Image: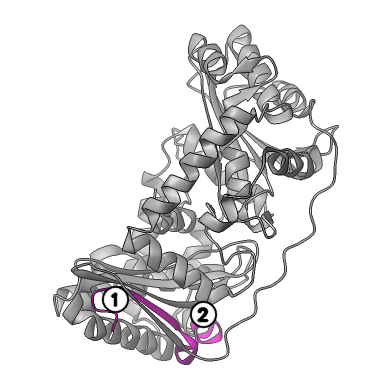
Amino acid sequence: MSVKHVCQCLVFLFVLISAPVHAVPEIQHWVSAQGGRVYFVRTEGLPLLDVKIVFDAGSARDGEKFGLAALTSGMLDTGAGDWDADAIAQRLENVGASLSTGVSRDSAWLSLRSLTHPEKLAVVLETAREILAHPRFDQKDFEREKNRTLLAIKQRGEEPDELVEIAFFQALYGDHPYAHPQEGFTETVTPLTREDLVDFHKRFYVASNAIVVIVGEVTRADAESIAEKLLSGLEKGTAPPALPSPTPVKAAGVIKQQFPSEQTHVRAGILGLAANDPDYFPLYVGNHILGGSGLVSRISEEVREKRGLSYSAYSYFMPLREVGPFEMGLQTRNDKAEVALRVALDTIKNFVANGPTDKELEAAKKNIVGGFVLRLDSNRKLTEQVAAVAFYNRPLDYLAKFTEKVQAVTREDIKRAFRSRIDPDKIQTVLVGGGAR
C-alpha cells in the first residue's frame, strides 16, 4: 500500500461495528497487571475475536537508524520461541486464525483474529504471546528480510508517486522523526544488524508501552484474561518520552525533481493538526468540502471537472501524535503541471479566506453522517477505530459522539480553524516528473 493510501486510511477511518440499531458499542478500559492499557468492546452474533496490540514503536522511534522499526516489526512472526515461520503459520492455520504485523510513523502493531472456542483461542494466544515476547530474529532470516527491504527501497526509487511523498515529508519536517519514510533508505538499512533489532525490541516492546484492543463475543472476565496472557511474557519496561514538536516552516518552498515520466506528481501542504487538536472536527468537515469528498470536492471540481487537468486531485489532514501534515495531491500531464498546481493552490487560498458555503456545509454533514452508519459493518473495523481512540488518548465516547460533533460544526468554525492552521504563503510544494522544470 502506498504512503498516500496509508495516509488516507489514517484520516478517514471512523468506522464502527454494525448492530441491530446501529448503536455505538461501549468501550471499556482498564490497566493490566503488567501496566498495559486495555480497551474492550463486547459484540454479539459471531463467535469471533479480533485483537490488536499496539506499541509506541513506529518509525519515529528509529533514531538515526531509519528503517529499524519497520524491519523489527516485519520480523516478529518469522520465528519465535521454539517455532520457525512455517511452524507459526501451521499453528494458526490449524485453528482457523490469522495474524499480521505492521508499522506506521507513530506505532507498530500485531493484529490477530480467532474463533472464540476456548481450545482454539488458547493456541492463538500462546502463539501471539511468544511472537511478542520472544521473537528469534534469526541471522539467516534477518539477512533475507533486510535484502527484501533494500530491494523494495530500490524499486521505490522507480515510482514517482513514492518519491514525491518522501520529498514532501522531508521538506515539511526537516530533521524531525516524522521526516523519513518508514522503510528507511539504502544507506540507513544497509548497516543495520540483528543486534539492532534485538535492542529495539527490548526497548519498545514492553508492557508499559503496550495497548491491547479486544473486540468480540467474549465476556469482560475473558477479555481481562486474554490481555494478561498476551502481555505476560513482556518486561514491564517504560513508555518512551514524547516526541519533539515539529518546527513550522517560515516561508513557502518549491522542490522540483526530474523523473522520466509522462505525468508529473505534485504534493503541496503545510503542518496541519495533531490527533487531539481541539479543532479536529471543523478541519475534518472543512477538508471534506475542500478536497476529501472525491469528485464533488472543490479541488477536484476546479482541477478535474472544469479544466480537465488531472484525473484526480484531493487533500487531507493526517493527524498524528505530534502535528501531522495537511496535504494536497494530484498528477497531471507534464506540460500542465504548473497550471494544475496554480489552480489547486488558488482553490486552497480561496477556501482559507472565505470558507464553505451553507449549501456545501449542509451537503458535507449529510454525506459524513450518512456514510458513518454505512460503515458499521465488522469487528475488524471497530478494532481499528478503538485502537486509534486508545493510541491517541481520545475520550472513550469519541466514537459515540462523532456524528454529534460533525453536526455541531459551523461555517465560522471552519473559517477560523483553517485560517489558524493553513497559511497559503508558507505552503511547501514538491513536483516529481517530466514537468518538474
Residue 3 forms part of the magenta stretch: no
How packed is label 1: few (under 14 Cα within 10 Å), some, or many (20 or more)?
many
* Residue pointed to by mark 1: 299
Q: Does 161 sit above or below residue 150?
A: below
Residue shown at 71% from the left, 44% from the top: 196
List x then y, in percent, for residue 253.
46, 87
Residue 431 forms part of the magenta stretch: yes
The foreground one among 412 and 80 is 80
List x then y, in percent, for residue 214.
63, 32
List x then y, in percent, for residue 43.
55, 28
The reply, left or right, for residue 69 in relation to residue 161 is right
Residue shown at 52% from the left, 11% from the top: 95
Residue shown at 53% from the left, 80% from the top: 417
* Residue pointed to by mark 2: 413
The answer to whether mark 2 and mark 1 are in CB contact below 8 A is no
Q: As shown in the figure, which amino acid type bears the numbered disc 2?
A: Asp
**The image quarter in which residue 60 lies:** bottom right
Q: Does 336 sit above or below residue 1?
A: below
Q: Does 84 sit above or below residue 15?
A: above
**The image quarter in which residue 300 lies:** bottom left
